[in-house]
Image: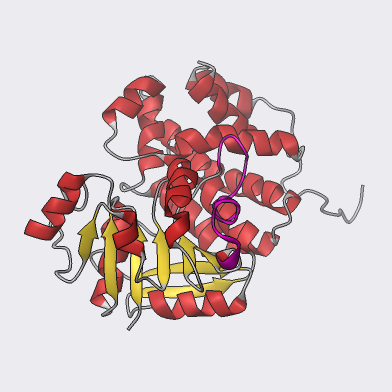
């Protein structure tokens, strides 16, 4: 069986490490926090996340990157998107040969507007730059770790890499599909976090299902427009990494981004939200990057624009809703033809 390194012991990294260890792989889990490592090794519990779950006894936890990686054939990068570059840079010297690297992070780097696969390609040694994959989909760690049936997508520029990752992650309760559209898979995972914040704001304002459905569908339209402008296949966004992830993130009690938006909708400031939350809400950082990408590619994204105004410019959620609903009427399907004028 393969040896696999999981870099990042947050809720998702821990859940994936557990899934892989339950399949019989040799798993080493890297965490920054020595107390987290100690708790995993001594009590088989995580100090912060998934506290009701017993962690597989065969997982070896460590704070040492070299110790975590040196024997691994596959390196799973389960760090938040904003930490991806710094940790990849530190791990670079240990990720050598024909190791496969797969990112679980959903976001866009704020300064460079790079996707996570691009960040990894930028930081890792030339010999592994063609061995990069992405795993993304409607995958809440709280459900995956309890073996609740779930589906996801792996993507890579290499069919061989994608199919190998598919086989590695596939279980009777975790179904894995492949998709060659790495841009679409990554942008679906990043953009949905922004729309989920807007959906949470709607919840915080006390709006109903009609509002939520409108945000999800029009958010999907924004996701497709931006993705297509960046070279993605629009059909990807009808799949698990697009619509699937968008729906679950906008609706679920487990969604950190929806929860962050709800707190803002109830009147909390961004600083108060960040202090309150125990976990990273990727969308808070990603919103600025997605807005910048919309400007770069001249893509109209009114939900994203209003989310950015609420998060960074002090505009009230109610004012944004009023502005959004008062826009000039447009076609739902751009470029659709009419039978008569």
| Residue shown at the point (12%, 52%) measured from the top left | 39
Colour scheme used in the picture? secondary structure
In the rendered image, the quadrant that contains the N terminus is: bottom left
Question: Which of these two is toward me, 197 or 116?
Answer: 116
Residue 125 drawn above or below residue 284: below
| Residue shown at the point (25%, 63%) measured from the top left | 145
What are the residue bounds of the magenta stretch?
109-127
Quadrant for residue 176, please give it: bottom left
Q: x%, y% of residue 21?
A: 25, 73
The total of numbered circles placed on residues is 0
Question: Which of these two is toward me, 341 or 278?
Answer: 278
Residue 207 seen from this side: no
Residue 59 drawn above or below residue 247: below
**Does the stretch in magenta take in 122?**
yes
Q: x%, y% of residue 184?
A: 63, 58
Q: Residue furthest front?
A: 93
Residue 259 seen from this side: yes
Left or right: where 43 falls relative to 168: left
Quadrant for residue 23, please give it: bottom left
| Residue shown at the point (52%, 79%) measured from the top left | 163
């Amino acid at each position: 069986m393969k040896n696999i390194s999981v870099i990042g012991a947050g809720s998702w990294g821990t859940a994936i490490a557990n899934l892989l260890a339950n399949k019989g792989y040799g798993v080493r889990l890297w965490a920054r926090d020595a107390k987290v490592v100690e708790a995993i090794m001594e009590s088989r519990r995580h100090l912060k996340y998934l506290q009701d779950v017993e962690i597989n006894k065969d997982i070896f936890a460590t704070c040492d990157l070299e110790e975590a990686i040196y024997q691994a054939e596959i390196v799973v990068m389960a760090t938040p998107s904003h930490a991806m570059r710094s940790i990849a840079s530190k791990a670079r010297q240990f990720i050598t040969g024909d190791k496969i690297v797969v990112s679980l992070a959903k976001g866009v780097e704020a300064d460079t507007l790079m996707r996570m696969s691009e960040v990894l390609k930028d930081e890792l040694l030339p010999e592994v730059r063609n061995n990069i994959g992405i795993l993304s989909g409607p995958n809440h760690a709280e459900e995956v770790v309890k073996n609740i049936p779930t589906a996801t997508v792996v993507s890579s520029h290499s069919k061989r890499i994608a199919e190998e990752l598919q086989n590695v992650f596939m279980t009777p309760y975790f179904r894995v599909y492949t998709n060659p559209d790495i841009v679409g898979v990554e942008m679906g995972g990043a953009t949905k976090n922004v729309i989920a914040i807007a959906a949470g704001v709607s919840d915080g304002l006390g709006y109903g299902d009609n509002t939520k459905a409108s945000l999800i569908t029009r958010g999907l339209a924004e996701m497709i427009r931006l993705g297509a402008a960046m070279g993605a296949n629009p059909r990807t966004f009808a799949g698990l990494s697009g619509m699937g992830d968008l729906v679950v993130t906008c609706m679920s009690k487990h969604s950190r981004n929806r929860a962050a938006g709800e707190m803002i909708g109830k009147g909390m400031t961004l600083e108060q939200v960040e202090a309150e939350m125990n976990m990273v809400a990727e969308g808070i950082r990603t919103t600025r990057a997605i807005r910048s990408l919309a400007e770069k590619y001249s893509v109209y994204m009114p939900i994203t624009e209003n989310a950015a105004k609420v998060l960074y410019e002090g505009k009230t959620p109610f004012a944004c809703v009023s502005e959004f609903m008062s826009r000039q009427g447009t076609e739902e399907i751009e470029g659709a033809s009419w039978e008569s004028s």
